[in-house]
Image: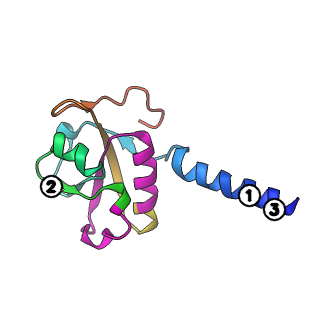
Amino acid sequence: MIYLILSLLVILVILYKRYFPVWGVKCSELEKIDLTNLQILDVRDYNESYNNPIDGVLNIPIAYLKRRINEIPQRDIHLVVSSILEKNVGIRALKHKGYRIVGYSIAGQNQNEIKKCHLEINC
């Protein structure tokens, strides 16, 4: 019985870290951001960021984020993601390492398209 409860707790923690929304980080359009004190970090996969490049951003895919964390400067960060799952995992990983995330943008599949965040509850 104790193993069943522990297994359920582990599954709940994993689901929480991946799918439960991160509060306090607002969705904003990439064109309307003041870039003077921000580092834009693209955590999309290399294939997605290659097909839809954004000039002047640091590209570290979410799978490589923990091992390449020392390449990110200690400034406020704006994330570019391709899904809500990447947003949740990326923000939690960076906040755990002491970074301040000020916003995120969801990149679309088309060239230079940034999706509007009209359905986000924390915008």
Give me the C-alpha separation between circle 2 and circle 1.
Answer: 46 Å
Task: Tell me: residue 111, above or below residue 16.
Answer: above
Q: Is residue 83 magenta?
A: yes
Label 1 element class: helix
State the residue in front, 65 or 115: 65
Give me the C-alpha separation between circle 2 and circle 3.
Answer: 52 Å
Q: Quadrant of residue 3?
A: bottom right
> Which of pointers 2 and 1 indicates the residue nearer the eye?
1
| Magenta span of residues | 64-93
Amino acid tagged 1 = Ser
Check the image and name the residue furthest to the bottom. 70
Q: Is residue 53 magenta?
A: no
Q: Is residue 58 left or right of residue 120?
A: left
- In the rendering, which numbered label is found on residue 7? 1
Amino acid tagged 2 = Thr
- In the rendering, which numbered label is found on residue 3? 3
Q: Residue at x 59, y 50 (%)?
A: 16
Residue 25 can be seen in this image: yes
Label 2 element class: loop
How many numbered dots are placed on residues in this image? 3
Q: Residue at x 29, y 56 (%)?
A: 77
Residue 81 placement (x, y as % from top left): 32, 44
Q: Quadrant of residue 48?
A: top left
Amino acid tagged 3 = Tyr
Question: On the image, numbered disc 2 is attached to which residue?
Answer: 36
Give me the C-alpha separation between circle 3 and circle 1.
Answer: 6 Å
Label 3 CA crowd tier, 10 Å (few <14, some 14–19, many 20+): few
Q: Residue at x 38, y 67 (%)?
A: 66
Quarter of the N terminus within the rendering: bottom right
Q: Earlier in the sequence, mark 2 or mark 1?
A: 1
Q: Residue at x 17, y 40 (%)?
A: 51
